[in-house]
Amino acid sequence: MIVPIFYNWVIIICRTCFNAIEVNYLAVWLTLDYLSDLMYVADTIVRVRTGYLEQGILIRDVAQLKKRYLHSSQFRLDLGSLLPTDLLYFSFGIHTPLVRVNRFLRTSRLNEALDRMETRTSYPNTFRISKLMLYIFVLIHWNACLYFALSNYIGFGADRWVYPNITIPVFASMRRQYFYCFWFSAQIFTTVGDTPLPDREEEYLFMIADLLIAVLVFASIVGNVGNVITSLRDRDNVFFPNHELVKAYLRNHHISKELRKRVSDWYQHLYINKKITRENEILQQLPVQLQTEIAVSVHLPTLSKVTIFQNCETSLLEELVLKLTPQVYSPGEYVCKKGDVGHEMYIIKEGKLAVVADDGVTQYAVLGEGNFFGEISILNIKGNKSGNRRTANIRSIGHSDLFSLSKENLMDVLSEFPAAKRHLEEKGRQILVKMGMLEECAEGQRGEVEKVETKLDRLESNLDTLRTKLARLMVELESSNRKMQARVEMLALEVEGLENKLPVGESGKREVGEGDRELERGEGVGGEVELEREEAEGEEVGAERLKEQGQDEAGEDVTKEGDGESTKSNKEETNEEAHGMEVEGDGGMDQASDEREKKGDDGENKRNKRN
């Protein structure tokens, strides 16, 4: 939408003020007018189907999109810009392009498009300057057109301030008219001066308005250019170290010229080749996932060339790329020396390094892109004769770009990938065997370590089994204690009930027959049987509740087995006791009935004798 909107902003005013341009190229303007109208219609259709975010979710439903757009203020502006005002040509004539002024209502789409382009371009500062210059061009263009229209109103050549008389052949051509007016407006807006003094009131008013606008234009130009320069300086400070501070430090401490030259060469190499040493600081504002994806796309090809990482998991490499630190070495600079304690390994991204003797001249080998060194000293391989010491001297031949991976970062990552750790250690042992730096007893020690690890695993498994059994026994013990406590409470209740009954029988002092007393005794025995039955049922219910409590405390797997057996045995005991009580109760009732019958017969015999 940038092209049609700019076309209307530039051409409509130009055709209105420069009549010769309107008349001579009418067919071209009409064609371009209706092409821009078609683009307006296409933009409206696109706007209807443009998604929007609602609570972070992209809405693409056509019905919702249409409803939202039709109820928005932007739809009213777009509809106003598409009104067929060209029909007014029949009233005002075909040479009145000002009837298309409603096309300016779509200017908001221009600002939206420019903002999106600024966020997507790789050169935002250049784009900002270009956008500013485009706005200034449109402003000067409008002022030039208005200056020519005012000159036509006052009269061409009426004084020195207005446009010269167009009857003069030099000033009669269309190009000369436009270029002269544009130059005059540019002089005013840039406050260069050297413009003719106005003579009329209209001319004074025009100049006053132009000078006020010129102040704003000048301020906007200075402000935008200043912002661009500041952002460029900030970008350099973020991407590259501050060279001025380092140079001042070297001067204040009287560092030798040779060392200062090396520092300057290092800075120059960074700046010319756009080398970045502070990648982590630049990307730290992004989410971790985006940081990982960027680091993978930038560094993963280099990391994949390292032989010890070629068969590792992709997730391991993704973790490692976030730990890589870029470093740049100057020509002749040592990366590491033989005998130094190794705290990191290095991966060559670009440049060449030489493995040299202690004299620093004799070269044993040359390492290039994708090679790595220093991994042996940070893997802590047992049996390594050199320990964690460097085994060679590595010196940069030219400017070399390396990635360093510290020992702490590597171990942190490998702690989450034990298989990869064993794989790397195995490759390290193979390298040490080829170099003759691995002790012979190391393999035996490795086997012993593996045996000890196996024993430890077995002991841990046995310990877990014993813990499970102990927990089960504890649950069973607790369940048994609860059941015994419940039985004691039931027996206490029974004894209390019997004690409450005895005083009632002694304090009655009523004369009852022996048969009635025996009947009451029989009923008492039956009541005891009933109490014992209720006790048995209460124990069963209590056992079931205790089983549920044991399951909640000890877990389902442990309680089901142990508590089930305890409950089953308690149920069997309770049933046997209840059955014994029932037999006892039946026998007591039969004996009581026999005694009542016998005593009843004795009573009848006594009565007969008395009679």
Image: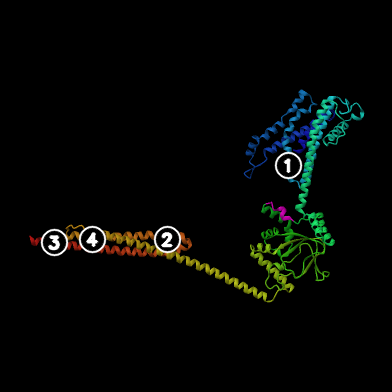
Tag 4 or tag 2, which sits nearer the N-term? 4
Q: Say which residue label 3 marks.
A: 603
Q: Say which residue label 4 marks.
A: 522
Q: Say which residue label 2 marks.
A: 547
**x%, y% of residue 511?**
16, 58
Tag 1 or tag 3, which sits nearer the N-term? 1
Q: Say which residue label 1 marks.
A: 115
Residue 328 magenta-highlighted: no
Seen in the picture, residue 528 relative to 385 is either above or below; the reply is above
Q: Is residue 140 left or right of residue 517?
A: right
Q: Residues within 10 Å of mark 2 (few under 14, many from 20)?
A: many
Q: Residue at x 66, y 74 (%)?
A: 443
Which label belongs to residue 368? none
The residue under label 2 is which amino acid type?
A: Lys
The residue under label 3 is which amino acid type?
A: Gly
Q: Are marks 2 and 3 in contact (CB under 8 Å)?
A: no
Quadrant of the rendering where the C terminus is positioned: bottom left
